[in-house]
Amino acid sequence: MTAVPKKTAAKGATPRSKARMGAVQALYQMELAGADVSEVVDEFERLRFNKPDDASPREEDDAAADLEEADATFFSEIVHGVVRRQRDIDPMVHEQLAAGWRLVRVDAILRAILRAGSFELIERRDVPGRVVINEYINVAHAFFDEDEPRVVNGVLDKIARKLRADEFERKGSVGK
């Protein structure tokens, strides 16, 4: 029941980028299957993040191969953090959606992307806001060919500017 991206991860994707992709897939799986956070995190860590013990290579289109060498700690922090902060995250995301749109109407994968990105903006101050936004736009591109990556950009940018106004002002005022 894991969401399978249409496109594979870019060559040389970082362990954190892979962790973000896995976190979105895990959040999707949890929502659709009603699975427990600890069970899903354990499943991803055991079955999807490590290279197989046998010497046979995985097929290139195998979605699990895209998650090999993901940063399991970072993945777990995102998934557990989204679950822990969901009551804060959902209203924040809902507020940034276009008039007439409710978060429950948004595609489940897109909802997972927005939640994970919002969590990082809230709690991961060690990661620059622009990096968070760019990373989740890339995740959206892996699943969608239409307007969804722009939605991710717009929603996360608005949230970032509210939560990290100083970071965006400081960056924008350089050279003035």
Image: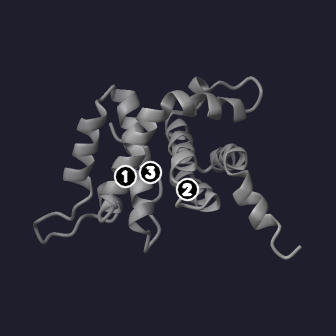
Q: Are marks 3 and 1 in contact (CB under 8 Å)?
A: no
Q: Which residue is denoted by mark 1 in the rendering?
A: 75
Mark 3 and mark 2: Cα distance apart in space: 28 Å
Q: Residues within 10 Å of mark 3 (few under 14, many from 20)?
A: some
In the rendered image, the quadrant that contains the C terminus is: bottom right
Contact, mark 2 vs mark 1 (Cβ under 8 Å): no
Snapshot quadrant of residue 70: bottom left
Q: Amino acid at mark 2?
A: Arg
Dot 3 or dot 1: first in sequence order is 3
Q: Secondary structure at mark 2?
A: loop
Residue annotated with mark 2: 125
Distance between the alpha carbons at the discs numbered 2 and 1: 16 Å
Instruction: Give the residue pinned by disc 3.
Output: 5
Give whichever of 42, 175 is nearer the camera: 175
Res 167 seen here: yes
Residue 20: % across, % down:
44, 54
